[in-house]
Amino acid sequence: MMKVGITGGIGSGKTTICKLFELLGIPVFYADTAGKELMLSDLEVKKAVVNLFGEAAYSPNGNLDRKYIADIVFKDDQKLKALNAIIHPAVKDAFLLWSEQQNTPYVLKEAALLFESKSYLDNDYNILVSSPTELRIQRVIARDQTSREKVLERIEKQLPEEEKQKLADFFILNNEELHIIPQVLKLHHQLVLLAQQK
Ligand code: ATP
């Protein structure tokens, strides 16, 4: 199965673009959602999370205390690295298993930190969705009812756009001037051809 990663900075519109690929029948694996689900359902992952953060990571009814964990990892980079070292391999396995069950020319894996986590190396190709920074900030403020400062903090934690551009094979510009549907259709046809040659 040909595997294609898709990423973009916060608010770039990667999820919006993925929905268009889904309309074309291409299955999308949402890595961040999968990671959250694995923290609830995978016993090995749960055990490792409790080892790292203590019993307080989960409430007695088994729900994850996301705020407790977020508050810790926001301030402690080592803990964030350790959490990623638990989640990323589990997500990688889940994606491989899932991708083998699909029956399409290729599959997409959407991940916010595709390049940062190095998981792009496991894919045949990687797509970068780009949007001007100011537009991204305005979109996220509107979508999440958050502040400009909070969005900037999150942008600063991501790899700079120029670095991502060096690592991507394909690009979609979601600047609300260029139409995205023709870009997605063109890329889809390119990927189907590449899958046939594989
Ligand atoms: P995050 O990294 O925060 O998950 P994302 O890259 O997945 O963000 P989306 O959630 O797809 O981005 O888009 C952010 C917001 O901008 C959403 O509310 C979405 O509806 C809106 N948006 C994205 N692209 C466009 C567009 N071309 N035209 C209008 N609105 C858009």
Image: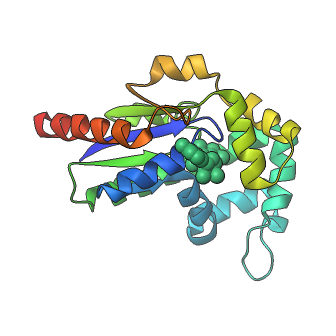
Q: Does residue 118 lie above or below 110 as drawn?
A: above
* Quadrant location, the C terminus: top left
> Which residue is located at x 74 percent, y 40 percent?
138
Q: Is residue 148 left or right of residue 116?
A: right
> Residue at the spot x=81%, y=67% of the render?
55
Point out residue 126 in the picture as x, y percentages from the top left corner: 40, 32
> Which residue is located at x 77 percent, y 70 percent?
58
Q: Residue at x 65, y 22 (%)?
A: 160
Q: Is 64 on the left-hand or right-hand side of 90?
A: right
Would you say 126 lies left or right of 141 here?
left
Work out whether residue 157 can be spotted: no
Q: Among all residues in the image, which is located at the extreme front? A: 177
Q: Quadrant of residue 163?
A: top right
* Quadrant of the rendered image containing residue 135: top right
Question: Can residue 189 be seen in the rendering of this structure?
Answer: yes
- Residue 29 image offset from top left, x and y in percent: 43, 55
